[in-house]
Amino acid sequence: MLCAGASSGTERDGMAQQTIHLRIEGVVQGVGFRDGLCDVARRFRVDGWVRNRSDGSLEAVARGTPAACESLLAWARRGPPAARVDRIDTRPATREEEALVAPGFRRLPTA
């Protein structure tokens, strides 16, 4: 489901891009977190995807400028009003995770 419209060194519109992986734990399912993350990604022109995990966490991969990815991460540290974020782990995305990134920001099925 599309919800909004690479490693460091890739470019988009002449600007350096980075691709990060986020694993978010806490009360993050059933509170509008995925939709909120999609909205924020659209606002900051970040491509990527988000999905629930069967363990109750949320997983996302985001590709954008370093500033855009940091803005997305800052929002994710709070989440929507009903969420409670206990922990966020970030790292560079793997090639397999990057391969799922397409233009826009979409929701993937639960993993």
Image: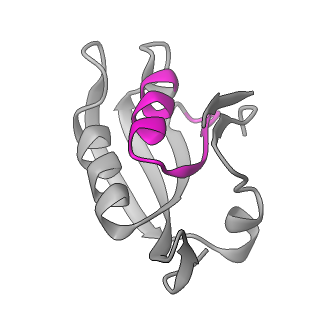
The structure residue drawn at horizontal position 40% and vertical position 37%, both measured from the top left corner, is 43
The structure residue drawn at horizontal position 64% and vertical position 33%, both measured from the top left corner, is 54
Q: Vertically, is 74 above or below 90?
A: above
Measured from the top left, where is residue 85 in percent x and y?
27, 34
Q: Where's the N terminus, which quadrant?
A: top right
Q: Which residues are magenta?
A: 35-55
Q: Nearer the viewer, residue 6 or 96?
A: 6
Q: Is residue 61 magenta?
A: no
Q: Where's the C terminus, which quadrant?
A: top right
Measured from the top left, where is residue 40 in percent x and y?
39, 35
The structure residue drawn at horizontal position 64% and vertical position 74%, both measured from the top left corner, is 94
Q: Residue furthest front?
A: 13
Task: Examine the rendering and report whether any part of residue 94 can be seen.
Answer: yes
Q: Is residue 54 magenta?
A: yes
Measured from the top left, where is residue 84 in percent x and y?
26, 26
Q: How many marks?
A: 0
Q: Vertically, is 12 above or below 88?
A: below
